[in-house]
Amino acid sequence: MLCGGRSSEHEVSLASGAGVRAGLAQAGHGVVGVEIGRDGTWRVDGEEVELCAGRGLLDADVVFPVLHGPFGEDGTVQGLLECLDVAYVGAGVLASAVCMDKVVFKHLMAHAGLPQVDYRGVEHREWRDDPDGALAELAALGLPVFVKPARLGSSVGIVRVADRDELGDAVAQALAHDERAIVEAAASGTEVECSVIGHTGSPEASVPGEIVVPERDWYDYEAKYTPGGMELIVPARISEAARARVRELATRAFTLAGCEGLARVDFFVDGEDVLLNELNTIPGFTATSVFGKLFEASSVPYAELLDRLVRLGVERHEAERAYRH
């Protein structure tokens, strides 16, 4: 099990890793915890781990990456695990990279015709050379908007902008985190999340759940990771038709992106209208995290869910080894 990492979500990853480690042990698995430091060093019980291409990792049957954000959720660690030739849980290199980049992911979903929140991407070069032109294009989104770094997770660096005079500063702040930012129109309706497990060709969606954030305007970092910061209502208080549509779009997005293993897919639902927001390939596994709670409500207990995920990782590794390179 890998946790920690170099990103700003290091502490969240450690908390998620503790939850996964306990769940895997409960499911009967022996677990070796590898903590990746903020400097990128891999250690087990304080001792540095030697990585050798083609030699696997610590004789593990399968690796469970519980890493959020850059250097863990973006395809980099997945590529390293491929070089080590070890089975691992979750999306591969390409799907991880695509889903980590919110602009690229939304472009892919738009090409397939999936309904989404309106958005615009802003490149650092574009902002440096012509900020007024970029702001003029963003005006088409209206207000309020959400400004985000394109390749961070867990609401890190996100700003809600309701005043046109504040938009420039918000974009500059997002671009301080990443060379690409995304600006999204505010969506009305209920925030709904749906968990998915399985292989690309046969994903299984959970019961959708509704996110309620007391005394906050939106589902920010504090709401996600502070006990009591949000309430999850399962099933979501939307129509049966809307629930079915959420599950359909969740599995379609999972398949279109080439995901494997697991994902959490986020939506906005207004009446019968369902808009896809984003897909997270390594969702949180802390005590307040939605991914496991949705499958628990779908009659898949936490330990069983983790057991299924590691088995999916082994199955994919064995299938990919059958191909000649």
Image (cartoon, rainbow, N blue to C red):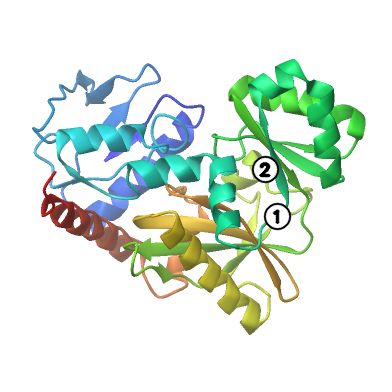
Q: Is residue 310 above or below residue 196?
A: above
The answer, for residue 91, to whether it is visible in the render is yes
Q: Look at the picture and state if 247 lies above or below 121.
A: below
Task: Name the side, left or right, on which 291 lies relative to 317.
Answer: right
Quarter-of-image position of residue 202: bottom left
Three-letter amino acid code at the position of disc 2: Asp
Q: Is residue 292 visible?
A: no
* Residue 300, image x, y percentages: 37, 71
Placement of 194 over or under 317, stated as above or below: below
Residue 24 location (% of width, % of height): 25, 53
x and y percentages locating residue 268 in the rendered image: 69, 61
Q: Which residue is mark 1?
A: 117
Please identify the quadrant where the N terminus is shown: top left
Say which residue label 2 marks.
220
Q: Helix, strand or loop at disc 2?
A: loop
Give the residue drawn at x 67%, y 43%. 220
Which quadrant holds residue 266? bottom right
Amino acid type of the residue that numbered disc 1 sits on in the rendered structure: Val
Local packing at callout 2 (Cα closer than 10 Å; few below 14, some 14-19, many 20+) is some
Residue found 54% across the figure and 39% down from its top:
153
Q: CA distance from mark 2 to mark 1?
A: 18 Å
At 61% from the left and 34% from the top, the residue drawn is 156
* Quadrant that contains the C terminus: top left
- Mark 1 burial class by Cα count in 10 Å: few <14, some 14-19, many 20+: some
